[in-house]
Image (cartoon, grey):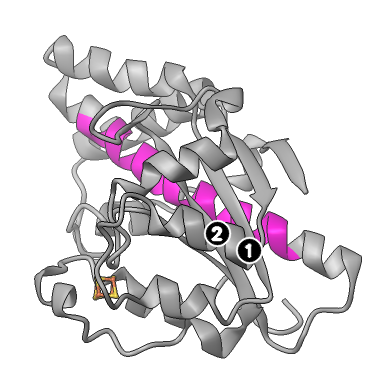
């Protein structure tokens, strides 16, 4: 299975409170009229300029072992390795919001329009993460469409650069997935272009395979601790 999907803009929900929370603004904060205007302007620019796309390609465990090994720089013990070995379904994925949006963010900063630039950057980063969740939902729907899934099937996305999977893993991932087909390229530092892109592996299996104790040595320096939220809100529980 290898597919390219264009997502509809209405599939990407942009809850203002959640986006502002990601900027450290509490839900109960009172926002000035000017702030609200900047937010609305950023949301409108996003709607106008984003071109959400995904490429997803199924992969077997032994082939993924090779991809995951990458340049041999992963942490010796890491959750991704433990999880993918227990999976029932694996697929490489890359999603992007397209070049025009990223170029607009750069242009705004270059022209000193920092407030709207920062807000558009923030909205876009949130949306790129949501796009990766949509890719996981896409794989979930494929699995369900082919056969009744095991109880509590969950599909979650994991990316190089997080949780012990070294950033240099992008190289093997790109070789195997070839997301250039939807316009995503990788530079020498393993950074993607367009910037608002996410790549990695979708891992499907019984919900419990995604649960782990986040006490790896590298967790000490992790600020995001996003695994907690992810474990709580897996893409879909049994029955959706
Ligand atoms: S605490 Fe951070 S590094 Fe550790 S597993 Fe969770 S998200 Fe990954």
Q: Secondary structure at mark 1?
A: strand
Alpha carbons under labels 1 and 2: distance apart = 8 Å
**CB atoms at circles 1 and 2 under 8 Å apart?**
yes
* Span colored in magenta: 118-140
The disc at residue 90 is: 1
Observer-nearest of 100 and 140: 140
Q: Position of residue 162 (x, y in %)?
A: 30, 60
Picture residue at 28% right of the left edge, 55% below the top: 166
Q: Position of residue 167 (x, y in %)?
A: 28, 49
Q: Quadrant of residue 86?
A: bottom right
Q: Earlier in the sequence, mark 1 or mark 2?
A: 2
In the image: residue 14, left or right of residue 166 = right
| Res 201 seen here | yes
Determine which residue is flagged by label 2: 64
Picture residue at 35% right of the left edge, 74% below the top: 227
In the image: residue 27, left or right of residue 205 = left
In the image: residue 194, left or right of residue 190 = right
Q: Across the whole image, how many numbered discs are drawn on residues?
A: 2
The disc at residue 23 is: none
């Amino acid at each position: 299975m290898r597919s390219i999907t264009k997502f509809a803009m209405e599939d990407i929900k942009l809850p203002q409170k959640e986006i502002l929370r990601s900027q450290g603004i509490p839900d109960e904060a009172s926002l000035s009229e000017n702030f609200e205007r900047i937010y609305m302007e950023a949301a409108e620019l996003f709607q106008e300029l984003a071109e959400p796309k995904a490429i997803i390609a199924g992969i077997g465990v032994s082939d993924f072992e090779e991809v995951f090994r990458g340049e041999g720089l992963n942490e010796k013990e890491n959750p991704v390795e433990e999880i993918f070995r227990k999976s029932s379904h694996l697929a490489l994925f890359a999603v992007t919001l397209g070049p025009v949006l990223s170029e607009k963010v750069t242009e705004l900063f270059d022209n000193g329009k920092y407030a709207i630039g920062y807000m558009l950057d923030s909205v876009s980063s949130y949306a790129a993460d949501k796009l990766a969740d949509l890719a996981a939902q896409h794989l979930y729907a494929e699995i369900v469409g082919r056969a009744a899934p095991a109880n509590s099937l969950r599909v979650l996305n994991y990316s190089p650069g997080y949780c012990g999977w070294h950033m240099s893993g992008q190289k093997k991932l790109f070789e195997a997935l070839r997301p250039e087909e939807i316009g995503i390229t990788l530079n020498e530092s393993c950074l993607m272009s367009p910037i608002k892109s996410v790549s990695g592996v979708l891992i499907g299996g019984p919900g419990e395979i995604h649960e782990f104790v986040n006490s790896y040595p590298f967790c000490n320096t992790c600020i995001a601790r996003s695994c907690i939220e992810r474990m709580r809100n897996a893409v879909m529980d049994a029955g959706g």
